[in-house]
Amino acid sequence: MRRFALWMIAALLCLPLGLALAEGESDMSYSDLFHQPTDTPAPVLEDGAAAAPAATATVAPTATPRVEADGSIVLTITAVGDVTIGRNAQYSGTSIFEKELARQNNDVNFIFKNTKDILSSDDLTIVNFEGVLADEYTIPSSKKENSFLFIGPPSYAEALSANGVELATMENNHIDDFGSDGRKNTQEALSAAGVTWADEYNMAVYETQGISIAVLSYKTFDYYSTLNVKVPQEVAAAKAENDLVIVCFHWGAEKDYKPNSNQRALAHKTIDAGADLIIGHHSHRINPIEQYNGKYIVYSVGNFSFAGNNKPDDMSTFIFQTRFKIKNGEIVSNSFRIIPCRISSKTDYNDFIPTPYTAELQINNVIKTMLNNGKSLQYAVDSYPLDWE
């Protein structure tokens, strides 16, 4: 398998058509104050091409690949949306997450109790971790007027590794709520818990079944002019050294049920550069999926375990799963399925426990939403299978 000659372990180690699927809950608005990233150039190779970001960590959970009868290896990869757990540092009382945690015997693993079996039965699960993990913190002056600053103790990271989550993307508009120290502390907490992570400056390389998977993480917002150049270069560099490349974008506008033109253009450039899968989040809404040049673009998986609101006006989400069949280092086929869910086990409020839907009406509403909102997309998929073909 292709590999980096040198794998650097970073020093930080250490849904205008929208079908609202409300179920009677009241709306409590959630408005992020976007973090504008520093315009940091990508590393450059001797030939002038951009290099992939430094690799954070490699994990090999299984020593012996599972080889199919035809000599291929099949990998199942799962992706879910925003995991925002902890309290809002701008609120002095007991937070909604802390209240629910107390009801759950102070066991933070409660957030995964209805999805652990799903997340633990694949080869790789990727979440967007949106918040900071730190025991101590300082609020930067530029953040003091923000409405939401999410933070939790480093021990919360163990809930990820204990429930089937192997990798967390961190590039989002809350990772820098507590400055560079908050970012560093979060990275250290994830690493200590055995969770591989990726941000814009550190690519994750995860190895399983003898296949190397590179995961790159970016946030967009007003950063498209740079990313339209930077991302394809970094994707091409990552693809040259790894079997699979997955790119995760934190993008779009809140409460949008479909991607805008900037998202679509960047997504297509990213696939053209060699990415095998794109996963998106940030809008707090589910978005349609495209199949472009044979690769899937999941524009938004919505929220997952989201402690930013106890009564969101749309609590639907889905778990995205894809299977790659790889033979002789080449992708022979890929397929996907979705598992429609509610971000809560309750219908009247958000208890932060993502729960698969069982009622046919709710499942069909999720599918109908994505099909309707995909009508304007040139490459939208025409079906959303619930099981493997």
Image: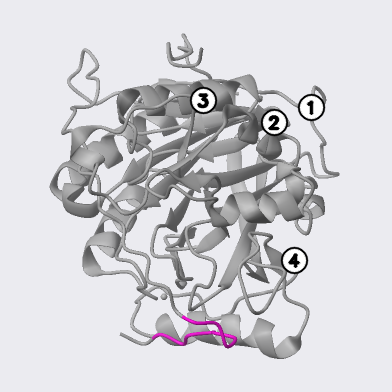
Please tell me which residue is depicted at 13% across the width and 48% down the height of the picture: 225
In the rendered image of this protein, does residue 57 appear above or below residue 293? above
Kindly identify which numbered label has been placed on residue 219.
none
Q: Nearer the viewer, residue 344 or 220?
A: 344
> In terms of depth relative to the viewer, which is nearer, 61 or 168?
168
Tag 2's secondary structure?
A: strand
Image position of 76 (left or right of 117): left
**Residue occupied by mark 4:** 388
Q: Earlier in the sequence, mark 3 or mark 2?
A: 3
Q: Give the mark toward the camera: 3 or 2.
A: 3
In which quadrant is the C terminus drawn?
Answer: bottom right
Residue under label 1, please give it: 62
Comparing marks 1 and 3, which lies closer to the viewer? Answer: 3
Q: On residue 208, which mark appears?
A: 2
Magenta residues? 18-26
Q: Could you give the CA–CA distance between mark 4 and mark 1, rounded to whole angstroms?
A: 23 Å
* Callout 4 amino acid: Trp
Kindly indicate whether the residue at mark 2 contacts the one at mark 1 (C-beta within 8 angstroms): yes
Disc 3 designates what residue?
A: 135
Q: Where's residue 26, x and y in %? A: 49, 82
Q: Secondary structure at mark 3?
A: loop
Q: How many marks?
A: 4
Disc 1 and disc 2: Cα gap in Å? 6 Å
x and y, in percent, of residue 256 in the image: 35, 73
